[in-house]
């Protein structure tokens, strides 16, 4: 088992004919992802690489193929509408890769999604990978832009606000002969879909996840909220890393949400919260895998 997606998940790609969307669609197909449709308004009836049918709308694609998940590569001007179109079509999951969606638009999306069952990962995220059993973990489900080959099927769940640190943690775990159940990069924007805590709760209930890695960063209070919940409710070992220990106050660290405007938003405060809740924290990125694997 895994969380959110598995090899049988039927995936559609919103923005499949754009350069970025087309590139990652091909990589996901090579990985073994079950991509059943693409959506680009005005190009319905065509085929992507002579194999994937393209539709004018998400509703048409869902009706024809039974897709349950979407990966959104739509430009920022239309990305918020693309998320809501996915929800309105009855999808269970959308992964929005698009960066730079205005905060006020995401606030509207967040409010509207409360009326739907669909889960949103992102925006501005690397996406989700549930590794498969084949070479370079092929035969799994890759929705987004994360490199598939660094994964290995296993039992460590990874959730991260940072894309590149997700890859670092995953590759370390793989190189040590362990593997991952599912890896979820939730993105670093101030307003996003699933939170660190949302994903930890899913891992906590997943029988195939034996341990959890959390990668946080400066900004917001998600790490503190997650640490408190883990201390009270989590049944599995958890290890953490927090990026931004040297970040100057008030300066953004890459992501729109990675900025410490007050003491509780600093890396030091988040690390203290994890340790107060008896959650081991890796001292550096290079120690992430060792920190979780010695708990298993």
Image: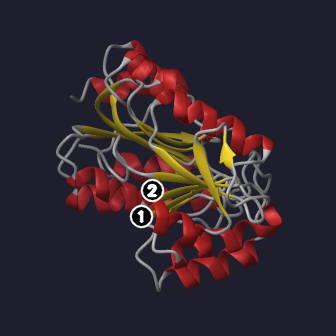
Q: Nearer the viewer, residue 86 or 54?
A: 54
Q: Position of residue 75 (x, y in %)?
A: 79, 58
Residue 203 horizontal side relative to residue 111, left or right: left
Q: Which residue is mark 2?
A: 196
Residue 284 horizontal side relative to residue 124, left or right: left
The image quadrant that residue 208 belongs to is top left
Q: Position of residue 220 (x, y in %)?
A: 59, 63
Circle 2/circle 1 CB separation < 8 Å: yes
* Numbered tag placed on residue 225 in the rendering: 1
What secondary structure is found at the residue carrying circle 2? helix
Write the residue at 74% across / 48% down. 17
Considering only vertical position in the picture, is 27 above or below 265? above
Q: Position of residue 65 (x, y in %)?
A: 45, 59
Q: Crowding at label 1, few (<14), some or many (≥20) Cα neighbours within 10 Å?
A: some
Residue 195 appears in the figure: no
Write the residue at 30% across / 56% down. 202
Q: Nearer the viewer, residue 175 or 231?
A: 175
Q: Position of residue 230 (x, y in %)?
A: 29, 56
């Amino acid at each position: 088992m895994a969380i959110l997606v598995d090899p049988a998940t039927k995936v559609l790609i919103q923005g499949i004919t754009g350069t970025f969307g087309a590139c990652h669609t091909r990589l996901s197909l090579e990985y073994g992802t079950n991509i059943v449709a693409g959506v680009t308004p005005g190009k319905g009836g065509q085929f992507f690489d002579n194999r994937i049918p393209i539709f004018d709308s998400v509703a048409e694609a869902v009706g024809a193929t039974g897709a349950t998940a979407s990966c959104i590569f739509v430009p920022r001007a239309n990305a918020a509408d693309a998320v809501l179109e996915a929800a309105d079509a009855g999808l269970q999951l959308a992964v929005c890769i698009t960066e730079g969606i205005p905060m006020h638009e995401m606030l509207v999306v967040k409010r509207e999604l409360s009326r739907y069952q669909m889960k949103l990962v992102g925006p501005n995220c690397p996406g989700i990978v549930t590794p498969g059993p084949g070479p370079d973990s092929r035969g799994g489900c890759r929705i987004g832009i994360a490199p598939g080959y660094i994964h290995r099927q296993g039992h460590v769940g990874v959730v991260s606000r940072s894309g590149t640190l997700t890859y670092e943690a995953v590759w370390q775990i793989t190189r040590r002969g362990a593997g991952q159940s599912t890896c979820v990069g939730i993105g670093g924007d101030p307003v996003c879909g699933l939170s660190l805590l949302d994903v930890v709760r899913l891992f906590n209930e997943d029988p195939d996840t034996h341990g959890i890695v959390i990668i946080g960063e400066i900004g917001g209070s998600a790490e503190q909220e997650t640490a408190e919940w883990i201390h009270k409710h989590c049944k599995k070992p958890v290890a953490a890393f927090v990026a931004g220990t040297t970040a100057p106050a008030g300066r953004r660290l890459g992501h729109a949400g990675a900025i410490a405007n007050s003491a509780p938003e600093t890396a030091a405060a988040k690390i203290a919260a994890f340790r107060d809740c008896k959650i081991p924290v890796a001292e550096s990125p290079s120690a992430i895998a060792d920190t979780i694997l010695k708990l298993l």
